Amino acid sequence: MALSEDVKQEIQQAYRDVLTGKSVKARYGQRLMIAEIARYLGDITADDGLRTSPPATCVVEAGTGTGKTLGYLVAAIPIARALGKTLVISTATVALQDQIVHKDLPDLKKHTGMDFSWTLAKGRGRYLCMSRLEARLHDEGVGDSDTMPLFLLDEPRDDEPGTRAFFEDMLGRYGSREWDGDRDHWPSQIPDETWRQVTTDHRQCTNRHCSYFDSCAFFDARKELDDADVVVANHDLVLADLALGGGAILPEPENAIFIFDEAHHLPDKALSHFAASVPVNSTRQWLKQLSQALAKIPPFLAPGTLAAKTVDKISTAARELDIVLAEVYGEAEQNTSWEFSEERRSAQWRYPEGQLPDTLAELAFTAQTATAALVRQLGVLADELQKAFDERKEHDVDRETADAWYPVIGSFHSRSEDQLRLWVAWCEKPPEPQEDKPVTSPPPARWAVRQRWDHAEDITFYSSPVLADNLLYARLWSRAYGAVLTSATLTALGRFDRLRSRAGLPEATRYMVVPSSFRYAEMATVEVPAMPAMPTDDAFGDVLVKRLPDLWAGDKATLVLFTSRRQMLSVRDALAPEHPDLIITQDDMAKGEVLRQHCQRVDAGRPSVLFGVASFAEGIDLPGHYLGHVIITRLPFAVPDDPIDASLAEWVTSRGGNPFMEITVPDASVRLVQAVGRLLRTESDTGRVTILDRRIVARRYGQLLLDALPPFRRLIER
């Protein structure tokens, strides 16, 4: 759709209005971003609302200070409304999600004449299930209940932190509308094991057949989704919706324009969503729970009915699967070269090129067949129970039995499907290369982890795609009407190649790097001091203990970043006695409280030093005097034993490539740029970055990493 003059005028006027209303100046990079997104969306052709032009995305790297959020909102909202599409904004962090919902969108509507609505989308598991809460209260204190078997889904009762008083308070607040049923809106943090007892998933939910449907927190929230012009979600929810086929929770991709903020997280998030795992001994314990549950249901089913016969078939399938799993465990335990260390009670084994040993491959196929039989029969029983909700017909199962047992069987069915995904993935054959069509994607990563505890042990099998390219292309890019990816760090070593391959971006994708408004050379320095040891040396930890106090001396606010939690804590333990009330690590308390205490110290005129690892290298915002010095102890190379990275490196090597230069260094560059990006958050910030890893000047790849950083003034000791 070529942009109409009316839409162009609306975009331009909205931008002028919001600048005037907020009393801020136009930013060159922001204007470029608005224009690029508008051009991209305007170039999409469609027939009867469906895209006819080839799949394409728009990738915009825009650093801190660009005003990315305002840029894409001003450009995309008028176009999405003109097209009749829903604008779906997806973030990687809750903090950015909250900022968009509670600040950016209200600001835009307040200062412009644009008329639009928005809502926040969350998965079903973030909302209260009244049916489960009622059952939880019904069973409290009753003991082993036959009429309300929902406790079969819960942890052992001795471990439950939730009390009857707590659940009654929850019911009272929801009934009086003091609370909307959203877990995140409860006044205190609800532990996972407590929340699991009062929420549900799509397999356990009876939807319109539930007696609480008209007052359901989740479906109330869903109604807002249907009417909203803008839906704010997160990457996990978008990917979960795509895994269900798209359109289950969010709008169908064909009817949506997606904005992926913090888009550099998307490929890794996609991998985790399409990975699968099965803990073998835990699954065998779960099968015992299934058998115990099945033993309680026959009195509620008429003999000879399909439901009653299916219970017997499920019991048989569960016994057969248990026998197979015992064989699988024995094979993996005895014929895998496990290497345990004294410090770690776990050992990992990766199957090279994703190839399983012949015996294990045969057992995996048998496990797939047995699990599929269990899934099939659980599905039949779930269907029979669900039929009882249709009051227009008579059924073999009565409504009360269905109300009690449908969520239980649905939960077992869902978990068995998750297990089947692993065995299917383990049995898939990688595509064979052909003369005219070489294999362009690596085989899946397959690995096993054996863990030991004081009184038990387990082996967990894993499978994961190595690249998310085909998954994202097939499920998202080829279907979405339009998609914009933006972040401060999308290039690696100055190129988009790594993102293009990891995310499977279409050939027609447009790329832009928005110039920063920061005067980097005037605002900050990057310093590489002389060091007597490299990070690979055993003495490096001792060197850090000696050097760090001199480096932060005189600074009001310092952030020290580590790549190893163990090293961070050992350095802290060595320094804390000599520097009391100075160091806070990110593990000392919740993230928000750590940052609050740090800022409180700085405001009081006291120096403060934060110690953090990966999440503090990206996910914190400390503008102005709250951060003046970032110390990077070690270049952020990936952990060498990550099985997905190792599988990708193996594949690159098999094709004649250099995985260190093609994968490891570019990925480290992205993480290093993110870490450095903690320093300057506004145009008035100043400070310095100190890198203690001399490899950045002593190795050939170091110059590439240095050159990819913002153009700070460099101070390098030789």
Image (cartoon, rainbow, N blue to C red):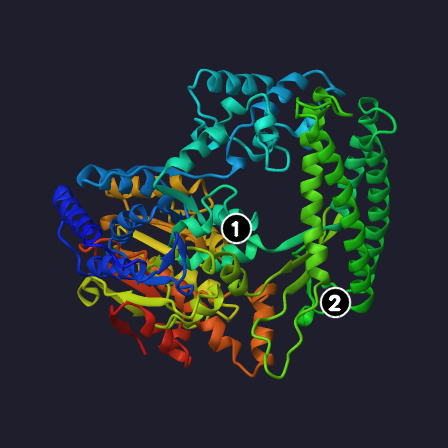
Decide: few, some or many residues near mark 1? Use Cα within 10 Å; few <14, some 14-19, many ≥20. many
In the rendered image, which quarter contains the C terminus? bottom left
Q: CA distance from mark 2 to mark 1?
A: 29 Å
Decide: few, some or many residues near mark 2? Use Cα within 10 Å; few <14, some 14-19, many ≥20. some
Q: Counting residues from the N terminus, which is met first, the one under dot 2 or under dot 1?
A: 1
Q: Position of residue 664 (x, y in %)?
A: 48, 71
Q: Which mark is residue 9?
A: none
Q: Position of residue 584 (x, y in %)?
A: 40, 46
Q: Secondary structure at mark 2?
A: loop
Residue 303 in the image: above or below residue 437 = above
Q: Which residue is mark 1?
A: 242
Q: Position of residue 455 (x, y in %)?
A: 77, 44
Q: Which residue sits at x=17%, y=60%?
A: 28
Residue 624 in the image: above or below residue 208 = below
2 vs 1, front mark:
1
Which amino acid does the dot numbered 1 rest on?
Answer: Leu
Nearer to us in this view, 180 or 579: 180
Looking at the rendering, which quadrant does residue 649 occupy?
bottom right
Q: Secondary structure at mark 1?
A: helix
Q: Which mark is residue 356?
A: 2
- The number of callouts visible is 2
Q: Relative to residue 509, is residue 6 drawn left or right?
A: left
Q: Which residue sits at x=86%, y=36%?
A: 312
Which amino acid does the dot numbered 2 rest on?
Answer: Leu
Q: Residue furthest front?
A: 48
Nearer to us in this view, 541 or 281: 281
Looking at the rendering, which quadrant does residue 336 occupy?
bottom right
Q: Relative to residue 479, is residue 434 drawn left or right?
A: right
Looking at the rendering, which quadrant does residue 431 occupy?
bottom right
Residue 581 visible? The answer is no
